[in-house]
Image: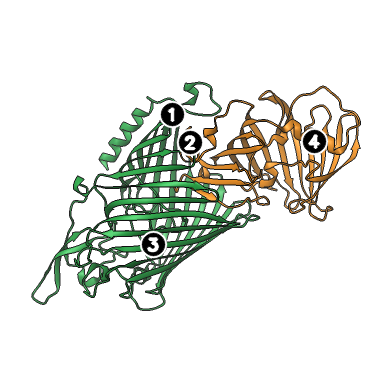
Chain colours: A orange, B green
Amino acid sequence: MKRIFIILFLTGLCSSTLFANLSADQIMAKVIEKQNADTSALDIKLTLIDSNGKERERRLQTLSKTVDGKTSSLTVFLSPESVKNTRFLSIENDEGNNEQWIYLPSLKRSRRIAGSEEAGSFMGSDFSYADMASMTYDSDQATNTLLSEDGTSYTIQSIPNDTKNYGKTITTITKDTFLPLQVEFYDSDGISLLKTLKTDNITEMGGRSITQTVVMTTIADNHSTRLEMLQVRYDMSLPDGYFTVKFLETGRL
Amino acid sequence: MKKLLILFILMMQTLALFAAFDIFSDTAEENSQRSISLTTETGVRMYRDKQLVPVLNFGVSATQETAKFKVQADLNYDVQNQTLSSDQLTITMFQGPTNLYAGWTTHPWGSASLSHVVDVVNAQDISAGIIDDLEAMKRREFLLGFTTYWEKSSLDVVVKPGFLPNSMASDGRWSLIPAAFASVTLTEPDTQTLQNSGGGARYRLHMGNMDLGLIYFNGYWPQSGYTNITYDSSFAVTGADLMYTRYQLFGLESNVLLGPFSLALEGGYFLSEDLDGTDSGLYNSKAAYLAELSYTDTATSAFFAVAYQGQYVFDYPANPIDVDVMAAYNNKAYANTIIAVVEVPLFRQLVNARIAGTYQIESEGYLVMGSLSYALQDNVSLVGKAFLYGSLSSLSSIYDTWDANDSVQIALQAWF
């Protein structure tokens, strides 16, 4: 599931249970397990911050629904004005591929679009489309190694099987919520640090513990993006009508 | 202008009657959405002959929507020409799988990005040249329409009570009338009558990696023909009545994904009321076709597209004053055009660079349009544009006629 802005990475169910002697794969499996939700609705603000501290804002809302392991999502772009009311629909088909359409209000047209833009910048931010889909790897996607552990956190190194986006990530995960606290993203050589992601302000939203704010920084140009969750809802009733060309074109169920 | 203002005021007063719609809202009151935005464009355009023309436009866009209704009013005021125009003045009702609308608007058809041959509902406004926005070039007119959706398909129907022809300048730098005909008296018929009504429908189907649309339209060709031509004693034309050709379009549009590429195809058969092509004032039947291949680079979001578009006129006449001959390029029954576009966002979308080129093969005419925008702030952009018209030969074409209209424009655009 790519180019879908689930961001469930940021969320997890509260748990007071402490897990002892877990392997790296088990820890990452728990991180992913905590991210699972059949439906979600997120209201997101992205703030792009250049190296001089100048800020630009983007705002979007996204809905997602998973049925039988297949995820559909709908994203509505609210700002800036130039992309306002642009809508993006992605439907995972039986073959596991995504059928994608975009509706451009200025053209009054919806159009099927090809492929994903995994490595491309999402709305000019420091997040790539792939980052917005997921920033953790399960055991099928990467070789996970537990680098260290202390009283409150695990540090896991993940070397993905497919290194086209990153060669290595190092993720620090809290033991109580299994929410990632920090992620370092390395180039395909596994040595050069490309980006860092830091989380802040863990709070309760939508019935879950959630990291309300994360900041992704690109090392090369010291540009960063702050991603804030303004509103969150999980596991609510979400009609299939949201994930249709009709909703894409009309904004109505 | 007064009519537009009154309509705008009436519609905005009606807006408060509706409630709203938001996935994060729990109550009808919270769901009521009203938005008003203002736009301005301030700048200057300089032509090759050094004429400077100020660019000063104000726009207001107001929307009120509920789950059942949407009212939209987009008005523009051109200070330079002192004209108020409506980009959109519509009310839409949503009922189950169907939405129904009425108002001054456009109804777009076609699956390609760069150009269309089946997007026939609205005529074009080329009274100020060609701009790099197909939708903005359309003439808004009163339309009634509905769209109904099924799981994998939809049907949209549009009705035009009367029609508007293409808008062209009759004098000035954008005029397409030869100097020899400048004094000819042309009588324009009233086209906005019920006798001139038209309408059509499109059925779209989504299948796997392909979208397919079938189109039928019955209406008028937006370019005028001529009848009752009068001459003086030296056989120079002194007057003519404009006339329009009714036709039926049987068309299709499709878009299919081929790996990272999108292939859009459009085609249509325009069956003229002049079935045997013998009336010199009416346009003959023709076939039109378009193929467009586009690609978006996954790493940079750069967009590339190239299109080949053309038409073939059946029963192409030998009569030099037949409208098909007068509208032809280099006296050919066929006309073909290549269009290409590259658009590249740079510096985290702070800068957007775009260049588009059109080359008309039979006349060897061309148009190159470039633009560069820089986002000074979230809602303020500095936009530079350049337009280059010309021809590689002396053959007659719209591009050759406008050869002296090369220009550069710089403007500040803001949204509030």
Tag 3: amino acid? Leu
Q: Label 4 belongs to which residue?
A: A29
How crowded pointer 2 is (Cα within 10 Å; few <14, some 14-19, many 20+) is rated as some
| Vertical relation: A245 (above or below) B334 | above
Residue B327 to residue B160: above or below: below
Cα gap from disc 2 to disc 4, whole angstroms = 36 Å
State left or right for residue B400 relative to residue A170.
left
| Host chain of mark 4 | A
**Dot label at residue B66:** 1
Q: Quadrant of residue B84?
A: top left
Which tag, 2 or 4, sits closer to the chain's start? 4
x and y, in percent, of residue A79 in the image: 55, 40
Mark found first going from the N terminus, 1 or 3? 3
In three-dimensional space, the C-alpha distance between marks 1 and 3, rounded to whole angstroms, equals: 45 Å
Residue A23 picture location, percent across and down: 88, 36
Which residue is identified by label 3? B52
